[in-house]
Image (spheres, helix red, strand yellow):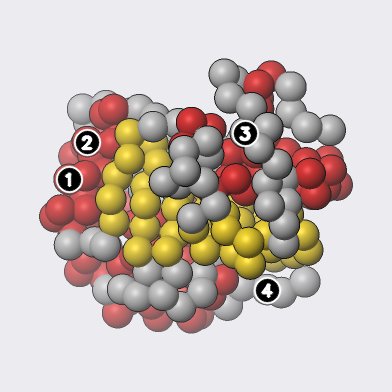
Amino acid sequence: MERVDFSAAEALYRAQKERFDRFFAMLREANGKFNLTAVTGERETFYKHFLDSLAGEPFFPRGANVAEVGSGAGFPSVPIMLVREDLRFTLIESTGKKCAFLRDAVREMGLRAEVVHARAEELGKDAAFRERFGTVCARAVARLNTLAEYCLPLVKRGGRMIAYKGAEDETEEAKNAIARLGGGRTERVLYELPEGMGRRMLVITEKTGATPAAYPRGQGAERRRPIV
């Protein structure tokens, strides 16, 4: 298992601190109008959002075309884009107000991204999105077996899914779903945020086969009846 080098992550943050500060100001202002995130303090945001997002940065291949499922307030996508101008993101979010915030952030920060107001399970059936992305990421969206059904249909063969998860290891529970959806080797990267801000895990799955046409099932089946 690999470990996260937070000294490298903090160096990336410091190099773009002015832009991170601008994004934090936008986040705090928008959070006063509608709930984007429960974490609002500057110190907690630095560790639990910014550094946590940057923990996965080394696993995004150079020049990748990336989709993010359930973008919410823009984590991990915005911090990753602030330090990786080689990446292009498609931000998939089903809540209109969050999409509006993301579009403002993309415009104000000059990010290489488009925002799509849709559900991932719908786009997974759309030929314009299905198996079109080299990397698909998600953070705090669903359990891994459900998340795999949202994400893997969007990943092209030879690409990867990067799931930002908590400390609980869900890989055994999700192994059948991953295999059925065309996933192959799965790697776990364990890490602990500095200053006791919590234990986390990245789950990185390679896409080795095509996703069967039956998936994603849609209409909420991914959550109600996850693949076991």
Helix, strand or loop at label 2? It is helix
> At 60% from the left edge and 45% from the top edge, which residue is drawn?
153
Labels 4, 1: front one: 1
- Residue situated in front as seen by the camera: 51 or 220: 220
Looking at the rendered structure, the kind of residue marked 3 is: Pro
Give the numbered dot on residue 104: 1
| Residue 168 screen position, x and y as percent | 75, 46
Residue tagged by mark 4? Answer: 3
Is residue 132 visible in the rendered structure shown here? yes
- Residue situated in front as seen by the camera: 43 or 179: 179
Give the mark, 4 or 1, whose residue is nearer the N terminus: 4
Gap between marks 4 and 2 measured at Cα: 35 Å
Looking at the rendered structure, the kind of residue marked 2 is: Ala
| Residue 53 screen position, x and y as percent | 47, 59
Residue tagged by mark 2? Answer: 100
| Residue neighbourhood size for the residue with mark 4, other residues' Cα within 10 Å, grouped as few (<14), some (14–19), many (≥20) | few
Give the mark, 1 or 3, whose residue is nearer the N terminus: 1
- Residue situated in front as seen by the camera: 188 or 134: 134
Labels 1, 3: front one: 3
Gap between marks 4 and 1 measured at Cα: 34 Å
User: Are discs 2 and 1 less than 8 Å apart at CB?
Assistant: yes
Helix, strand or loop at label 4? It is loop
Compared with 110, 62 (above or below) is: below
